[in-house]
Image (cartoon, rainbow, N blue to C red):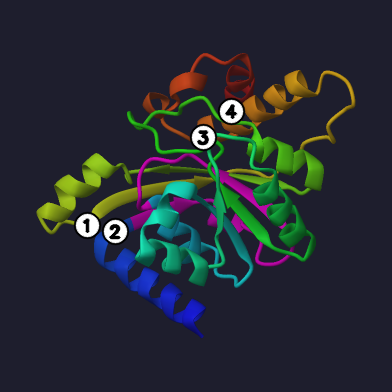
Amino acid sequence: MIYRLVRIFINIVIKLTMKIEVEGLERMPQSGSFIATANHLGRLDAPLIWYYVKRDDVIAIVAEKYQENAFLRWFARQLNAIFVDRYNADVSAMRQVLDRLKKGGVFVVAPEGTRSPTGALIEARQGAAYIASRSGLPILPVAVTGTEDRLAKQRLKRLRRLQVSGRVGEMYTLPPLPRENRDQVLKTYTDEMMCRIAVLLPPEYRGFYADHPRLKELLGE
């Protein structure tokens, strides 16, 4: 009951503060397990998860620092979010995600692990690619623009809604991790994830991956 009330609250807040246009939303499955990966621009990215993924089995991870705030800790728990240590290999959190995916959940994650200070993509961490390769589930790339904290402060102070754009790409999968050269392969998988997001973004948002050979391949397809 509380979960649904929290989602209603999120929907109201988003409708009041944002004007959103999304391209390719029909590609998002309404059933079955999958992993959605997205860039991370600002604090308002997180509510968009529950606004667009209209399911009760959403799996989201929340930075460990938010456990220190009683309200945010309670809010995250009502949404069944998993707290994760961003600075260390959080084996417990990854196991929780994998267990819930086996039951049919939808994992929504920003591989970068934190908000970009410039708005452009920063180098991603390897946790999301590890979960994707272990689960074997399809991956849905999503790109978002317009949710930067700086823009949010400027526009909301003037009582103007944010102009948010989103693009949803085609699904793909990653092969299982091999026994040898796992670290290098995992880096390749992570780069693949990020380049699939980068190709959906305007050039100025591609940041760390702007000159990546894989991105150039995807742009040429």
- Residue at (50, 77) in percent of width and height: 3
Q: Which mark is residue 195?
A: 4
Q: Is residue 41 magenta?
A: yes
Q: Which mark is residue 18?
A: 2
Amino acid type at circle 4 is: Cys
Q: Residue 220: percent from the left, percent from the top? A: 61, 21
Q: Residue 195: percent from the left, percent from the top? A: 58, 28
Quick check: marks 3 and 2 in contact, CB under 8 Å?
Answer: no
Name the front one of labels 1 and 3. 3
**In this picture, which residue range is highlighted in magenta?**
20-44
Q: Nearer the viewer, residue 207 or 22?
A: 207
Q: Is residue 12 magenta?
A: no
Q: Is residue 176 above or below residue 82?
A: above
* Pointer 3 residue: 112
Q: Dot 3: few (<14), some (14–19), or many (≥20) neighbours within 10 Å? A: many
Q: Is residue 26 left or right of residue 210?
A: right
* Pointer 1 residue: 161
Q: Dot 2: few (<14), some (14–19), or many (≥20) neighbours within 10 Å? A: some
Q: How many marks?
A: 4
Q: Dot 4: few (<14), some (14–19), or many (≥20) neighbours within 10 Å? A: many
